[in-house]
Image (cartoon, coloured by chain):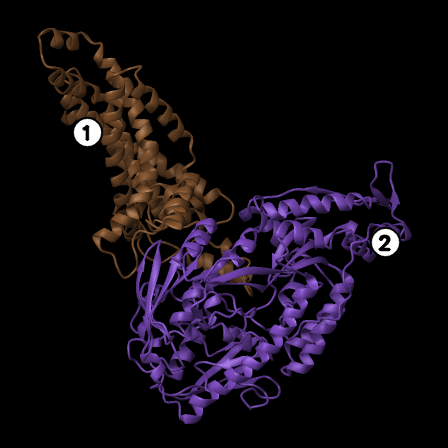
Amino acid sequence: MARYLLSRLGQSLILLFIVSFIGFAVLTLAPGGPLSQFALSPGMTQEQIDKIASQMGLDRPVVVQYFDWLSHLVIGDWGTSYRDGQSVLHVIGSHLFATLLLMGTATVISVTLGSSIGIYSALRRGGAFDYTMTVFAMVALSIPTFWFGLIAIYIFSLNLGWLPAGNMYTVGDGSVLDYISHLIMPATVLALVDVAIWSRYMRTSTLNVVNQDFVRTAKAKGLTGRRVLFKHIVGNSLVPMITLAGLQLPMVLGGALVTETVFTWPGMGRLFLDSLGYSDYPVVMGLLMASAMLVLVGNLLADITVALIDPRIRLD
Amino acid sequence: MTDEKKNSAHLNRRQALMMMGAAGAALMTPMAIGRDKAFAANADATGQLVLAFSQEPTVFNPLMPHIEVDEGLYYAVYDTLFDFDPDGEFFPILAAEVPTVANGGISADGLNWTLKLKEGVTWHDGTPFTSEDVKFSLELTVDPDFRSFRSTGYKLMQDITVVSDTELTWTMSEPFAPMAAILASTYIVPKHVFDGVEDKNATILNTAPIGTGPFKFKNRMAGDHIELEANADYHMDGPFLKTLIIKYVPDLNVMYTQFKSGDIDVIGLQYITPDHLAEAEGLEGKEVTVAGTATFESIGLNMTRPQFQEKAVRQALYLAIDKTSIIDALYYGVPTPTETYMPQQSYYYNDDLPTHEFNIEKANALLDEAGWEMGSDGIRTKDGVRLYFSNSTTAGNHLREQAQQFIQQTFAMIGVEMTIKNFPPAVMWGDYWMNSEFDTVVVGLNTLAGADPDTSDYFMSTMSPALGGSGQNTFAYQNPKVDELLTAGAQNFVPEERKAIYEEMQAVIREDLPFLPMFQYAVVKGWKDDVTGPTPNVNNRIDSWNVRDWKRT
């Protein structure tokens, strides 16, 4: 196990290095750059732009900039945002809570609801519920989130006036109830698609298990339906879901760009897009590295958990 | 529609004049009383107001490189020495009076300036504001260690001398009339926060700005909003709001929805999209108004290209643009047609320029007369030069892309072939634009700095990078008469004389047509009807220029 972990760590470091190199190259070679937004400002001159560029070190060769950035990253200095002058870790941290709140809620809803629907559909395969849910999943997967979010706002905020039309909380209020009322719509909109995805995966995975010999044996032993379901079917059908959950981790922390935009939610998705728009290299690179790390960690955790749960799998 | 607009603009100007008189009187009063800042109005500040922008203000030090939306915050937290009112007249803020040649603040040759400041002004942290702060701010703009936004004008200032706590003087290395307009957009920063700081780019101003403005910075929720509270010690009348929230709403549809639902009190930068104008005007409890901006849309020509050497060609092209259809069909009639780069609200606007007409016959006749013969392919040619060129603008700007197709069709009717070649913004407005690598462009430009009419940067022949200069004359326009007028205008400090100079210049440019003027942009602004104060001001970059006066009733 220790050897396995060590070799995974080694692979991960190499991967991170490659990711950082490609990310940095793509970012800096793209036309524009962090100073292009000032080009059309009244009274701006090329001379002034060149001066600012040299003060920021942007006039150095890209390779030099890259290794400068990398050498700082290695010692834990993620750099400073061009946009607001704060440290990159602070910038990411200040958006993390909003994203965790929204994505966490949505994930809890979608995993519990999606899994339940999936298992139930599989057990009653071809029944009315199964068909209804299949249709629901198709519809949910096809609706553009942006449109769905706006429709929800139109109905529940503008017409009925039940829920706020976005934002994470009311400035000056910020009570738990206030947060919850703001959370309902975006979390539901976001969960809708995930429920569909999770229920489809869970349904397939359960179907694979339902017809296995050990399930038949369990039934033949005379176990109750409930016991067969929870002890033998669910446990086994969840194993592939763990890998899926591991892949989900970076998404949970990465934020949901579209939903965050529609509901003016100050999360990581918006941060990434805004930082890209302003060519805020340090923040974009920071987010890129963070999500690359999360992908690696998520995969590793999933592999370890599966190995712990499923005795047929050994990590060597 | 057009006539109606003109009338209302006229009325507005008159109203604005009257308002100005009233504002002037109001401003005089506190000074006459003895500059006592203990005005009761501050204590009455009540209520909360949410002002929304579609971009996020993030740069809090106003002397560092920033964008338009950041100034939305500066007007609340910081003060300038003086500023422009909607009519383009100066009014004092931190200055006791605006220096002019008439009041002796500027010497007749424009070289020696004396600036007197108000007494008893304090920074938000309680430190007294003095002329040392002004000197420091002005010098910071040219400090080699500081990442300064601008140095134009400031680098001409020499020997900035503190005479007393409320007076300073300096000498200009050459007369430069636009200096006053530059000062009007220079926010003064506190010297004491830079004391003992090693890196001037990393002071507390970046995260918790301290100014002398009507509102104090309270906190920022990154990616969401900034909360400001009334400055009870403000040195002018106001503020009248207890809390001001600057809210960031990234999507314009969402922003409009939140305005409708009442989550937003004042809809700011990028505003209500023109397609929502009709609906917005019918909203209950909302005030919606169309306001001109200083940006004008035009077809810019690259004057180094052989196709555009003849005036007849440029005039024919202008005749072949169906402006009215473009404005009405694509822009919902919101912008106003224009013949010049100068905003119609400006004091320096020349309203005597010949009016554009859409006339294909006349355009064809003009080209026939000039000897441009129609080829077998339907394209005119003269001396081996075909009337063929490309037109570029920002890819993804749908309105402009449709306008291009419109123009392409009408140009074809006069034997001109125009192809469309668009690029993403970073490419379009990079070297392609700066070094005049285009044939023609569709561009929205604001050539003015505040209300000052000087546009040397854009029209002086020495300001074209393609011709070896370093400014923004990307049309590569060269006319000795224009150069002469620009030079004279920049050295003249008498508004009436300058008006004559710049009106003549607009006439010359209208005749030359280095760009084919289309329209002056207008935006649809909106606020709840219990809010008073928001006033369009074409001379400032953003709405909160008078946020100190905003109230809720």
**Rendered position, B307 above or below A11:** below
Q: Amino acid at mark 2?
A: Lys
Percent x, y of residue A255: 33, 42
The hue used for chain B is purple
Residue A6: mark: 1
Chain letter for the brown part: A
Residue that badge 2 annotates = B362
Question: On the image, which quarter does residue A268 sit in?
Answer: top left
Percent x, y of residue B73: 41, 66
Question: Crowdedness of circle 2 by 10 Å Cα count: few (<14), some, many (20+)?
Answer: some
Residue A192: mark: none
Horizontal arrangement in the rendering, residue A54 relative to residue A231 (left or right) = right
**Rendered position, B141 above or below A107:** below
Horizontal arrangement in the rendering, residue A104 relative to residue B505 (left or right) = left
Which residue is rendered at x = 55% and y = 58% of the image?
A40
Percent x, y of residue B132: 38, 82
